[in-house]
Image: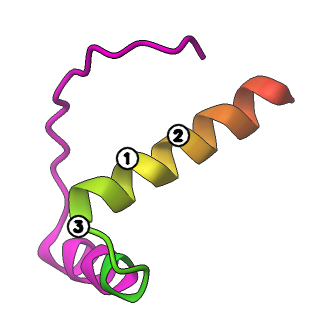
Amino acid sequence: MTKNTKTEAIIVRVSPDLKADLQKLADADMRKLSDYVRMQLVKLVNKTTKA
């Protein structure tokens, strides 16, 4: 993954139950929901590209 200062918005549609679960995880990590989801996506991409 390249380091780039430009960001893009991606709309993700999830069920209300999944959003609530993700919000609980974000709250436990003391992050905003959007930051938590971004962090998890970066981890997944990094893990996938290293395999």
Say which quarter of the image contains residue 12. top left
Q: Looking at numbered disc 3 in the image, what kind of residue is underneath it?
A: Lys
Report which residue position mark 2 lands on. Answer: 42
Report which residue position mark 1 lands on. Answer: 38
Query: Is 49 left, or right, of 50 in this rendering?
Result: left
Eyeballing the image, is 10 above or below 42? above
Q: Residues within 10 Å of mark 2 (few under 14, many from 20)?
A: few
Residue, x 23% and y 55% (percent of image)? Answer: 34
Q: Which residues are magenta?
A: 1-25
Report which residue position mark 3 lands on. Answer: 32
Q: Looking at numbered disc 1 in the image, what kind of residue is underneath it?
A: Arg
User: How far apart are labels 3 and 1 at the CA level?
Assistant: 10 Å
Q: Are marks 1 and 2 in contact (CB under 8 Å)?
A: yes
User: How far apart are labels 2 and 3 at the CA level?
Assistant: 15 Å
Q: Earlier in the sequence, mark 2 or mark 3?
A: 3
Whole-percent x and y of residue 16?
Answer: 13, 75
Query: Is 50 left, or right, of 28 in this rendering?
Result: right
